[in-house]
Image: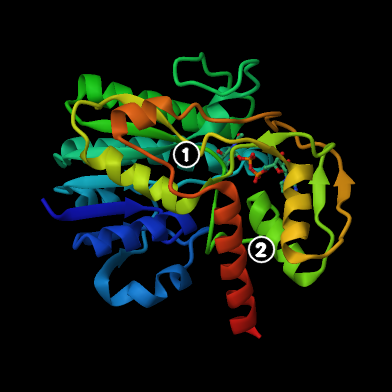
């Protein structure tokens, strides 16, 4: 009853989830190949976790760790729209074949429930906002399609293999420990480090695309609820804040918070980019009992403070 497994537990979302599980007194096993996750994200809790440096593409290696888990949170992925276009084979193998391996290991190992990190990218450019779970998905990129296939596998494993599963569509999650150093990094991690270092960020396209940026602790709250609420197996829920802001407005707001004036540069729009994104949060509120705890601005300020402290500590 107490064994919790987190794939991708060394990533910024996974490590925040692991901290919350430890605070609840859970026994936590992490599966991570450290391709984008970092041991540094687990430094302060390393004596309280069991870390398995394994790749979800290796079924034989991950199956014994997953077997017998009370809950398995499957967050491991190659999480990027542009990376899935630059490296379609790798992202297909990890996001589809690796995800299949996790569900298969969970079903064969009689796991109590798998909570799967799906993506808001599945919606694509649907005309109606906010985006509600009953809409037909319109994936625009390999990554969006791969994450959607994972959802379909989740519901098929629930139907055919007697495995409880729940999918949460993450909406542009941000917060402390998000890695700003890769060309595929989430935009807010890039914006914040540019802001603190006085550099100009590059905005891809006209900057009028909008996102429902969601603070990591609210996503952790949803993951914990999805793990415990009964009667939701096979379902899909939006994991978003419910708001929407353009990139231009976001960069402006960050400059105002910091009291600086740094004009952004503009580059070509990214292939596969969704124009507008905003979660309808009603199903999560009604069925999971979720209430977002952080406004976008609160999340921004907390994250900015983390980057500031981290940057100072690194000097
Ligand atoms: C998608 C999903 C998100 C999550 C994520 C994982 C949507 C709406 N969201 O996020 O839920 O699954 O993938 O990676 O599909 N950008 C810049 N400058 C930069 C970096 C990014 O302008 O330096 C733009 C980018 O073109 C996009 C926006 O910022 O319009 C957000 O990009 P992102 O990579 O942070 O996340 P996104 O929306 O692809």
Task: Give how far across and how far down residue 217 sits, in percent.
Answer: 43, 53
Q: Which residue is mark 1?
A: 95
Q: Residues within 10 Å of mark 1 (few under 14, many from 20)?
A: many
Disc 1 on helix, strand or loop?
helix
Query: For this view, does 152 lie left or right of residue 132?
Result: left
| Residue depth check, mark 2 versus mark 1: number of the one nearer the observer | 2
Visible in this render: residue 9? no
Distance from Cα at disc 2 to Cα at disc 1: 22 Å
Along the viewing direction, whichever of 11 and 315 lies nearer the viewer? 315
Q: Which residue is mark 2?
A: 181
Q: Residues within 10 Å of mark 2 (few under 14, many from 20)?
A: few
Query: For this view, does 152 lie left or right of residue 173?
Result: left
Quadrant, the C terminus: bottom right
Along the viewing direction, whichever of 225 and 268 lies nearer the viewer? 225
**In the rendered image, the vertical position of residue 67 relative to residue 311, given as above or below:** above
In this view, which residue lies farthest toward the bottom? 315
Q: Would you say the residues marked 2 and 1 are in contact, meaning their CB atoms lie under 8 Å apart?
A: no
Task: Give how far across and how far down residue 314 sits, in percent.
Answer: 62, 82
Please give the name of the residue rendered at 57% of the width and 42% of the height, measured from the top-left corner: 172
Please give the name of the residue rendered at 45% of the width and 15% of the height, measured from the top-left corner: 134
- Of the numbered discs 2 and 1, the one sitting upstream in the chain is 1
Along the viewing direction, whichever of 68 and 217 lies nearer the viewer? 217
Please give the name of the residue rendered at 47% of the width and 39% of the height, measured from the top-left corner: 95
Residue labelled 1 has its Cβ within 8 Å of some atom of ligand 1: no
Q: Quadrant of ligand 1?
A: top right
Residue labelled 2 has its Cβ within 8 Å of some atom of ligand 1: no
């Amino acid at each position: 009853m107490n064994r919790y497994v987190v794939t991708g537990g060394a990533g910024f979302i996974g490590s925040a989830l692991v901290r919350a599980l430890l605070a609840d007194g859970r026994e936590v096993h992490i599966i991570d190949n450290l391709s984008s996750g970092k041991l540094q994200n687990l430094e302060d809790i390393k004596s309280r976790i069991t870390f398995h440096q394994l790749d979800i593409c290796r079924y034989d290696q991950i199956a014994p760790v997953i077997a017998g888990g009370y809950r398995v949170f499957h967050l491991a992925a190659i999480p990027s729209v542009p990376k899935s276009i630059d490296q379609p084979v790798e992202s297909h193998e990890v996001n589809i074949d690796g995800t299949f391996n996790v569900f298969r290991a969970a079903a064969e190992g009689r796991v109590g429930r798998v909570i799967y990190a799906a993506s808001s990218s599945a919606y694509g450019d649907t005309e109606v906002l906010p985006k509600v779970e009953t809409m037909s998905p319109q994936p625009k990129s390999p990554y969006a399609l791969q994450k959607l296939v994972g959802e379909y596998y989740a519901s098929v494993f629930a139907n055919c293999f007697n495995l409880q599963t729940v999918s949460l569509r993450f909406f542009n999650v941000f917060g402390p420990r998000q890695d700003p150093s890769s060309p595929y990094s989430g935009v807010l991690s890039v914006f914040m480090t540019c802001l603190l270092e006085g550099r100009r960020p590059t905005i891809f396209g006209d900057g009028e695309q909008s996102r429902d940026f969601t603070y990591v602790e609210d996503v952790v709250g949803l993951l914990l609820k999805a793990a415990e609420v009964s009667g939701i197996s096979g379902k899909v829920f939006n994991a978003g804040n419910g708001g929407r802001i353009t990139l231009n407005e976001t960069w402006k707001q960050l400059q105002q918070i910091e009291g600086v004036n740094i004009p952004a540069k503009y580059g070509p729009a990214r292939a596969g980019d969704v124009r507008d994104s905003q979660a309808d949060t009603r199903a999560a509120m009604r069925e999971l009992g979720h209430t977002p705890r952080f406004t976008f601005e609160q999340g921004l300020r907390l994250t900015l403070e983390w980057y500031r402290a981290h940057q100072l500590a690194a000097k």
